[in-house]
Image (spheres, rainbow, N blue to C red):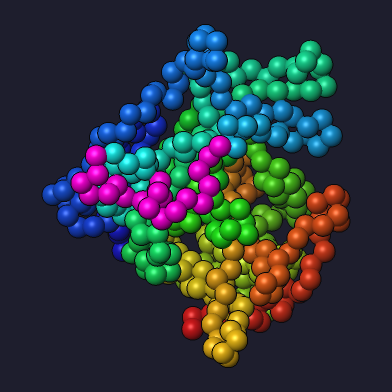
């Protein structure tokens, strides 16, 4: 079935882009339109900065440096140290504007919305107009390379209510979120210098979330990330040795085995990977060869909206807890949700779209910490087995 979503673009007071994605009938039809002006007295984000001596200096964005030991870019975004962190509910910057309020330092001008996407006010990656993007030597030393972190960071708010999560919002809203992911991925891939687009969600304080409001993020990187580069190397090696596509062959093997399959629909398969690293980990992959979210057809998107929410619900029933009175409930797990999409350009051939969700929660009250072996050597040690994870998820899935 085809979903009806209306996209409306506007600008925030400091010049950042904002997009409403509406699924409410009166907004889809054009009968109503969300508020498009931003009344906040914010200066243009690229306006010169006046230092303590009264001198004007041009705005500089975040920079990145190439680690010569690993060949990986490291972004330096020191301005993010002062970003909003766990504000009270009445100062939530992702909430709709308060009706009748003359001024509120929130990011959404409208007093209600369905799904909204906007440029991050404290971005890790940012294009500064007129700034040279050339890679140069740091301190005049050829061994150290540095360049502007000229990408883009967007925030996607899944809904207007602080207390609601995606499962509670339901498949219709999930479908609108999918449409927003697809739209923004396709648009950001067209930006100059973008090599990879990453849609993700950090959920829970244990993950480091700074805002409780149900939301995710979308990054457009000016380089291919280390995780993707590693998968590309493995995929190329697999193709050279077997002639097959690595991700397609992994999915086929998981389906043949069936041991770690959590759910299988007409278009998608949800499973625990054979070499799962985390205490709770699930991968979700389309059966068709798809490179990016925007390549999914209507049937695949509709199917995704349902299986995605079942996946989240199962994760939140993984751990059962009991209070002092003997009352039992489930622990909402902290998690990271990552959409892996093929990078831009010639690197697309060997990668397929898939989603990975993982949680650091290894038991109620206990987290998986990355100790010396993991953080120092990158050598992972799991405290459980993929089969045990799959067995528990199947117990609670769909209940």
**Which residue is located at x 56 percent, y 90 percent?**
325
**Which residue is located at x 70 percent, y 34 percent?**
74
Q: Main secondary structure of the magenta part?
A: loop
Q: In this view, does 41 lie above or below 136?
A: below
**Which residue is located at x 65 percent, y 57 percent?**
247
Taking depth in this image into account, of 354 and 395 the one nearest to the observer is 395
**Position in image of residue 29 (x %, y %):** 17, 51
Asked where in the image residue 118 lies, by quadrant, the reply is: top left
Q: Is residue 59 above or below residue 100?
A: above
Taking depth in this image into account, of 61 and 127 the one nearest to the observer is 61
**Position in image of residue 326 (x %, y %):** 58, 91
**Which residue is located at x 75 percent, y 18 percent?**
138
Relative placement, left or right, of 217 versus 149 is left
Relative placement, left or right, of 155 versus 202 is left
Q: Which residue lies furthest to the bottom in this view?
A: 326
Taking depth in this image into account, of 236 and 330 the one nearest to the observer is 330
The segment highlighted magenta reads 82-102
Q: Is residue 358 above or below residue 393?
A: above
Q: Is residue 167 magenta?
A: no
């Amino acid at each position: 079935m085809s979903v009806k979503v209306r996209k409306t673009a506007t600008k925030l007071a400091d010049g950042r882009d904002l997009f409403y994605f509406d699924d409410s009938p009166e907004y889809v039809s054009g009968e109503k339109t969300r508020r498009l002006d931003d009344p906040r007295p914010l200066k243009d984000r690229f306006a010169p900065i006046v230092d303590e001596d009264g001198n004007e200096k041009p705005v500089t964005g975040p920079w990145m440096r190439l680690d010569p030991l690993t060949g990986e870019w490291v972004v330096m975004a020191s301005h993010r140290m002062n970003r909003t962190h766990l504000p009270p509910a009445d100062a939530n910057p992702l909430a709709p504007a308060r009706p009748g309020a003359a001024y509120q330092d929130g990011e959404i001008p409208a007093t209600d919305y369905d799904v909204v996407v906007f440029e991050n006010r404290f971005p890790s990656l940012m294009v500064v107009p007129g700034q040279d993007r050339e890679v140069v030597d740091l301190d005049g030393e050829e061994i150290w390379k540095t360049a502007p972190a000229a990408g883009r960071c967007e925030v996607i708010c899944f809904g207007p209510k602080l207390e609601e999560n995606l499962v509670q919002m339901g498949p219709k809203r999930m479908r609108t979120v999918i449409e927003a992911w697809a739209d923004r991925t396709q648009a950001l891939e067209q930006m100059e210098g973008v090599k990879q687009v990453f849609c993700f969600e950090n959920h829970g304080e244990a993950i480091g979330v700074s805002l409780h409001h149900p939301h995710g993020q979308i990054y457009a990187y000016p380089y291919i990330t280390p995780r993707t580069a590693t998968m590309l190397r493995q995929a190329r090696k697999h193709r050279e040795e077997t002639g097959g596509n690595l991700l397609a062959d992994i999915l086929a093997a998981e389906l043949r085995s069936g041991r770690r399959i959590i759910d299988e629909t007409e278009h998608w398969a949800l499973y625990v990977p054979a070499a799962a690293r985390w205490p709770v980990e699930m991968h979700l992959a389309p059966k068709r060869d798809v490179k990016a979210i925007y390549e999914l057809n209507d049937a695949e998107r509709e199917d995704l909206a349902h299986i995605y929410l079942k996946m989240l619900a199962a994760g939140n029933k993984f751990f059962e807890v009991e209070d002092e009175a003997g009352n039992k409930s489930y622990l909402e797990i902290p998690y990271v949700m990552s959409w892996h999409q093929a990078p831009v350009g010639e690197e697309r051939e060997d990668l397929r779209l898939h989603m990975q969700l993982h949680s650091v929660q290894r038991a109620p009250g206990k987290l998986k910490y990355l100790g010396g072996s993991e953080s120092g050597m990158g050598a992972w040690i799991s405290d459980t087995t993929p089969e045990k994870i799959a067995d528990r998820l199947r117990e609670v899935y769909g209940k």
